[in-house]
Amino acid sequence: MAATTAFPTARTEIAGQTIADLVGQYGTPLYVYDQNVIDQRIEQLKSFDVIRYAQKASSNIAILERMRRRGVVVDAVSAGEIHRAMKAGYQGGPGSHEIVYTADIFDRQALEMCVDHRLHVNCGSPDMISQIGNRLPGCEITLRINPGFGHGHSQKTNTGGDGSKHGIWHSQINDCLLRADQNGVTVTGLHMHIGSGTDLEHLGQVGAAMESAAREVGRTLKTISAGGGLPVPYKDDESYVDIEKYFQIWDDTRNRLSESFGHRLQLEIEPGRFLSAESGYLIAEVRAVKKVGDNLFVLVDAGFNDLARPVMYGAYHPISVCSIKGNAAAREEVPTIVGGPLCESGDIFTQREGGFVESRMLPTVGVGDYLILENAGAYGFVMASNYNSKLRPAEVLIEDGSAKLIRQRETMDDLTRGEIIPD
Ligand code: LLP
């Protein structure tokens, strides 16, 4: 795969479908996913024994169903994600690892669902070991270990070190094995996930940390999980990690452990972003173009209620333009600040971490043109909200040359569903 990507600043189609047709049929704001991209990313990870999709990245049941048909299993971090996985056809049951519940707590509903459906549990806190042991004595569990370091594209996506709430602290493995024993459960899996959007250097260090943790657990181990965190490029100068090198680090770790334990360990990977980010686009219509001092603001009908990553992390999403008249690629590029419709100053797609607003060189646009926020397939729709009473957008999947609606745009009735005006 190419080390870097050149993002276009103009486009007329997505995966063979014209943007004019897509918005004509489904309106805006609109999430569009290209199944081919997901399929390519799955293919790239095929050397791992198990690909476990971190569905928090993009959890529409149509996407999950396609994952299942391709042999990809899932994790679930909540009762709702267990429900989604089951709607998509994944099953629990003794010994089944199709759905693994990975979290730092059981809320009561999630615990009930894990018990009812006999899900394999990945415990991120020691308390979870006794909670599941009390309900399912004899079951097998995984421990999520915080190796004492972490890394991510933002401090908010760093999930290791002593400032993180995630996982069981690495020096407490023995205590946890004891606790497991007292509660009649067996530790058969170990898992580490140090952060989201990290790099090969940090991801590689996890292999060594896993090796020493695994030796503490010993021969009951059947599976080790490398977690997720694989980055995707969001800017022209960013790159992927070398998947072959990454696999090699983990395969070597697995092989050494398998040799010591006398049986072959399964090697899992648990990506979210890598599988789904580049498949997704958020299309928005330009509704106002105005000068504020020397700055040019282009305001579109999608806001941080639709795509929260820029306001939350200062995350950069490539933006391209589709014009209704003529060819956007031929237009002069001008410094542009892109914002949304919300009554909040932070509703800006072109900003850096810390809220610093930036201009981006984009083809000149007018009202009625479309902006496409690219690489929006991971942590896009799933983080959407109804803030400012905006309706959450529709989602469309493009596969086999056609566009298929996989989630209807919300309606005004959806917006107030469940609300009650007492007498
Ligand atoms: N496994 C566990 C236990 C996780 O907590 C996560 C992500 C993943 C796997 C998948 O990580 P990925 O491969 O996608 O990097 N909303 C943030 C990302 C939060 C990630 C949370 N956990 C963002 O938009 O960047």
Image: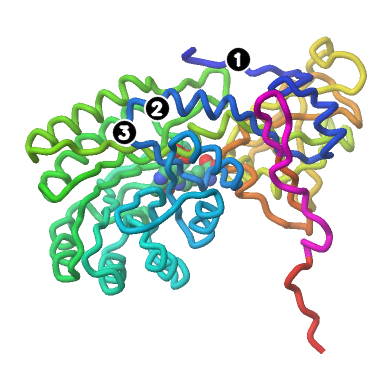
**Residues rendered magenta in the picture:** 396-415
Find the residue positioned furthest to the top: 330
Q: Position of residue 106 (x, y in %)?
A: 40, 66
In percent of the image, x 57 and y 18: which residue is there?
236
Q: Are marks 3 and 2 in contact (CB under 8 Å)?
A: no
In percent of the image, x 19 and y 32: which residue is there?
253
**Which amino acid, by three-letter code, is at mark 2?**
Leu
Residue in front for this viewpoint, 268 or 203: 268
Say left or right for 422 vs 208. Answer: right
Q: Position of residue 13 (x, y in %)?
A: 76, 21
Q: Is residue 275 visible?
A: yes
Gap in angstroms between the C-alphas marked 3 and 1: 32 Å
Kind of element beneath mark 3: loop
Crowd band around label 2 with a 10 angstrom C-alpha radius: few (<14), some (14–19), many (20+): some
Crowd band around label 3 with a 10 angstrom C-alpha radius: few (<14), some (14–19), many (20+): few
Crowd band around label 1 with a 10 angstrom C-alpha radius: few (<14), some (14–19), many (20+): few
In percent of the image, x 49 and y 12: which residue is there?
2
Q: Position of residue 340 (x, y in %)?
A: 78, 42
Gap in angstroms between the C-alphas marked 2 and 1: 23 Å
Kind of element beneath mark 2: loop
**Which amino acid, by three-letter code, is at mark 3?**
Asp
Pointer 3 residue Cβ closer than 8 Å to ligand 1: no
Whether residue 408 is in magenta: the answer is yes
Gap in angstroms between the C-alphas marked 3 and 2: 9 Å
What residue does disc 1 label?
Answer: 6
What residue does disc 3 label?
Answer: 49
Q: Position of residue 63 (x, y in %)?
A: 58, 40
Say left or right for 403 vs 57. Answer: right
Whether residue 37 is in magenta: the answer is no
Instruction: Please tell me whether mark 2 or mark 1 is closer to you in this view.
Output: 2
